[in-house]
Image (cartoon, grey):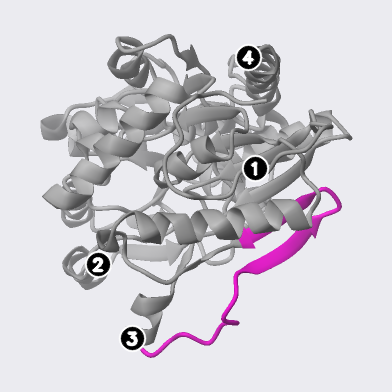
Amino acid sequence: MGTSTAHQGDTTAVTADAPDETSLVVCSLEEWGPVRRRIRILVDELVTMDPSVRVLYVAPPRDVPFDLAHGRFHHPVGPSLEQVHPRIHVLRPRKWLPRAAGPAADRMLGRQVASAAARLGLVDPLVWVNDASYAAFALSTRWPTLYDITDDWLLAPVARRQAARLRADDELLLRHSGAVVVCSPDLARSRGGRRPVDLIPNGVDVQLFRTPQPRPVELPPAPVAVYVGTLHDERIDVDLVLQLAASRRDVQVALVGPDSLGSGSAARLDAAPNVHRLGPRPYERVPAYLQHADVVLVPHLVNPFTESLDPIKAYECVAAGRPTVATPVAGFRDLGAPVTVADRAGFVDAVSQVLDTAPRPDDADADRRTDAPVADWRERAESMRTVMHRVRAEASHR
């Protein structure tokens, strides 16, 4: 069973006479942890929906040379394989060579994944590729392959050599994967011109985000403006956040989520007395921060990279029902209430308008819009499962 006649690299193919139609090898850009994002959520949903599904989740590798250079490598030499659920194992490979070393670096990672799959007895699993650096590995195994594009990293400002590798891996997967799944209309346009793609947007755990939670003790006192999401210089408009903080010194600004900001941006935010970087929080606690916000902020940069996204927070904001002010980025422009879209020049004024007129979170008549339509993650998992069945079926006839 296979999806391609093109095989790159020298990773040993794993073959058997009895394919396992419910096994997944998920090569993800996302960590496995309390902060749950698209891939992790979909994996959880698929395992819940089908009691026969078994998963090897490949988390981002541990960069051994980098850790050694910075004196912080205190981990076992070999890759870590942890059982996090009766039917889910998480592999954290070890990256021994930089990708600049050439194909050998990717082959070493691929061999660790193949070894873990064999150890778990996964036979001809479907390879769900979110981290495109596993392109050569996925195709060399001859296992059915699905390419899931969640961010258009081809648009991110990276070094020329890295950009060339990203383009090569993307091209390989577009040409030879059994299916290509994208999460946003912009990605559907950019990749759909090359081959058929399946558009499966993001979603939200509707019940979780609409069930009232107590106010987090670490949330600054009201009035508080809350941003929930990854802090990254390519996404969040740091200057705009600082403009808001300077304009409304009576308002506390809480930034909740994984922090990937450069040291300069972090220092500037920390210098503002009413801006608070709270760090990541477990997925189950995220609704509390939105529910108790006087206003939810989405101060995203508007650029080709953010245009390629389908922000999960858009679904979460609608489900939570608190007033939200967003820059005109993809995913927010056409939502309507409770979301207000304002361009950069009018963003601070729009936030002030909400703060001065909207009901407070603790008001008895605060409207949480529990009837606002929004797609649940279960629907998205059903769509993904349909695509996976198709990929397996088509591969079995080749």
Q: Which residues are magenta?
A: 71-91
Closer mark to the observer between disc 4 and disc 2 = 4
Viewer-nearest residue: 156 or 340: 156
Q: Amino acid at mark 2?
A: Ala
Secondary structure under tag 3 reads loop
Q: Earlier in the sequence, mark 4 or mark 3?
A: 3
Residue 70's mark? 3
Q: Marks 1 and 2: in contact by CB < 8 Å?
A: no
Neighbor class of circle 4 (other Cα within 10 Å; few <14, some 14-19, many 20+) is: few
Which residue corresponds to mark 1?
Answer: 25
Label 1 – label 4 distance at C-alpha: 21 Å
Of mark 2 and mark 1, the one earlier in the sequence is 1
The type of residue carrying mark 1 is Val
User: Which image quarter holds the N terminus?
Assistant: top right
Examine the rendering and report whether any part of residue 12 can be seen.
yes
For the residues labelled 1 and 4, say whether their Cβ atoms are less than 8 Å apart. no
